[in-house]
Image (spheres, helix red, strand yellow):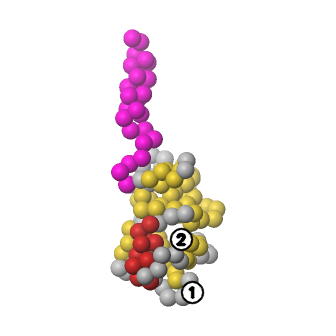
Amino acid sequence: MPPYARVVLAVAIACAAGCGSPSATSRVEGDLQVDQGVTLQTELPTSLGGDAYRIAGTPAAVNDTLRVTVEYSGGCARHDFSLHASRVFMESHPVQSAIVIRHNANGDQCRAMLRRDLTFDLTRLRDAWRASYQQRHGTIILRLRGHRSGITYTF
């Protein structure tokens, strides 16, 4: 077997074992893989540190998924993004929740401008609302740090 064929075979075996398959913390919604859920905290998550990024376009809450496109610099290391929200709602009608995306560039010093579509599962936030208000259906206005207007999340 030629050397390049061994490489192709090794990559094919590795991908069959894990490429594109949902992780234990992800779910599939239509053709969209939702990678992680929101982390709930007791305090407002406005003071979370993290590396720089910019929200591109308009974020949206569709079904139980927050979809956000971010831009950031890097290209030499894996970048991790996580969503954080308070389990305490801001009283208004409808109620509001401060949410923050935390970016960890893992020390990446490269300067390529990258764009990535993120998806976050909002069911923990929905369930916290249901427990607080003892109702099944409702609306939360998500106040995402770095985005000017609220994002309507209806369930």
Q: Is residue 23 left or right of residue 95?
A: left
Residue at horizontal 43 percent and vertical 18 percent from the top: 4
CB atoms of marks 1 and 2 within 8 Å: no
Question: In the orientation shown, which residue stands out farthest toward the right?
Answer: 57
User: Which numbered marker is on residue 24?
Assistant: none
| Looking at the image, residue 99 lies above or below residue 28 | below
Asked if residue 67 lies in the magenta stretch, the reply is no
Q: Position of residue 79 (x, y in %)?
A: 43, 53
Category of crowding for the residue at label 2, using alpha-carbon neighbours closer than 10 angstroms: few (below 14), some (14–19), many (at least 20):
some
Whether residue 126 is visible, yes or no, is yes
| Looking at the image, residue 96 lies above or below residue 76 | below
Cα–Cα gap, marks 1 and 2:
15 Å
Q: Position of residue 102 (x, y in %)?
A: 44, 65
Inspect the image, locate mark 1, and give the three-letter code of the amino acid beneath it.
His
Looking at the rendered structure, the secondary structure element under dot 2 is loop
| Looking at the image, residue 61 lies above or below residue 87 | above
Asked if residue 6 lies in the magenta stretch, the reply is yes
Whether residue 45 is visible, yes or no, is no
Q: Position of residue 37 (x, y in %)?
A: 42, 62
What segment carries the magenta color? 1-25
Looking at the rendered structure, the secondary structure element under dot 1 is loop
Q: Which residue is mark 1?
A: 93
Dot 1 or dot 2, earlier in sequence = 1
Residue at horizontal 38 percent and vertical 72 percent from the top: 40
Inspect the image, locate mark 2, and give the three-letter code of the amino acid beneath it.
Phe
Nearer to the camera, 121 or 133: 133
Which image quadrant: the N terminus? top left
Magenta highlight: main SS: helix
Residue at horizontal 56 percent and vertical 66 percent from the top: 61
Nearer to the camera, 70 or 15: 15
Q: How many marks?
A: 2
Q: Which residue is mark 2?
A: 155
